[in-house]
Image (tube, helix red, strand yellow):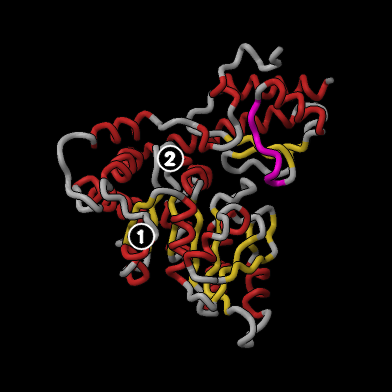
Amino acid sequence: MSTKNPDCPGYFLQFASDNTSGVCPEALAAFNAANSGFAASYGNDDATHQACDRLREVFEADAEIFFVFNGTAANSIALASLCQSYQAVICSDTAHVETDECGAPEFFSNGSKLLSAPHRHGKLTSSGVLEVITRRTDVHYPRPKVVTLTQSTEMGTLYQKGEISGISRIAQEHGLKVHMDGARFANAVAALNVAPADITWRAGVDVLCFGGTKMGLPIGEAIVFFDRKLGEEFSYRCKQAGQLASKMRYLSAPWLAMVNDNTWLRHAGHANAMARRLSEKVAGIAGAELLLPTEANGVFVNLPEPAIANLKATGWVFYTFIGGGARFMCSWATTQEAIDHLASDIERALAG
């Protein structure tokens, strides 16, 4: 006999990732609207041109922009464009490029090494980055060339503008470029309430991989080169990596819908608000321990194994291998009702 909660439909119980949500209505409408008549291929269509122009307005920069299918490709070929095979990328040991890309950054760069630096709640520190840069300078050791930051981090924390600027300054002083994995960049901007430019190029970031899928798009990430020279031949990398969509309008049209009228920030703000609601409720439950500050759309909770097993038997879906505890991710589609049900079931599971 199933122990799954009969009061909660399947989608209601999904907190494993913001990837599990569906496509938000604005993006879906734009996707369907793109399916009308004929359009130029390989990014030469009107929707792609318009989406790029709007993103330039969002970032207040004359950036070079490319759309690719997924985050693994975005991060990996962007990093590969910034370093040679004998060079290295500095990251935290919790970074997605280190733990969850199946070696793709190394593959696409023909062997560039990832070097782990100390972090605090998922965030690199200026001193830690400097230590790795200056650790060795001999020919027998890979030469650091890129620092990659994740915003928001895999542990749900946010880099403040000053933290990014500090790391960027050290990188620039030593000839390194700065890459930002922005799979949840929308959540960071909404939470920090800053201009996107303030935590990217104005703070020293050279390249941003702007996540679309997690914020409600059907598919597709945007790679934003704030220095156009860095992206001069990037289209060839996209083609070689199988990331140049022939019907590009299906990737770019939903982006246009998201950045118009700040739809992306509204949805990200909702996801963040749901995470705060859950965090506040969990903080009042006896036996539950918040492991990390809830700064974006993820809530990390230390729960005993019996309680975790109870929740999963009830049907709740979440990960327990990220951040050292149970991770609950909220999305544009998360409802207050789902949050309240989850908090109630956590309390019940801990009671016994």
The magenta stretch is 316-323
Numbered circle sitting on residue 260: none
| Residue at 54%, 78% in the rendered image | 86
| Residue at 61%, 12% in the rendered image | 7
Numbered circle sitting on residue 265: 2
Residue placed farthest to the left in the image?
A: 37
User: How many marks are shown on the rendered structure?
Assistant: 2
Look at label 2 and name its amino acid.
Leu
Q: Which quadrant of the rendered structure holds the C terminus?
A: top right
Pick whichever, 133 or 205, lies toward us: 133
Give the image location of residue 286, x and y in percent.
Answer: 81, 27
Seen in the image, is 233 located left or right of residue 46? Answer: right
Q: Please tell me whether mark 2 or mark 1 is closer to you in this view.
A: 1
Residue 230 magenta-highlighted: no
Pick whichever, 25 or 274, lies toward us: 25
Seen in the image, is 107 located left or right of residue 156? Answer: left
Look at label 1 and name its amino acid.
Cys
Pick whichever, 19 or 125, lies toward us: 19
- Mark sitting earlier along the chain (2/1): 1
Quarter holding residue 96? bottom right
Pointers 2 and 1 in contact (C-beta within 8 Å): no
Residue located beneath label 1 in the image: 238
Q: Which quadrant of the rendered structure holds the N terminus?
A: top right
Residue placed farthest to the bottom in the image?
A: 138
Measure the alpha-carbon separation of dots 2 and 1. Answer: 28 Å
| Residue at 64%, 61% in the rendered image | 92
Seen in the image, is 121 located left or right of residue 178? Answer: right
Give the image location of residue 348, x and y in percent.
Answer: 77, 19
| Residue at 36%, 39% in the rendered image | 262
Give the image location of residue 157, x and y in percent.
Answer: 62, 49
Residue 322 magenta-highlighted: yes
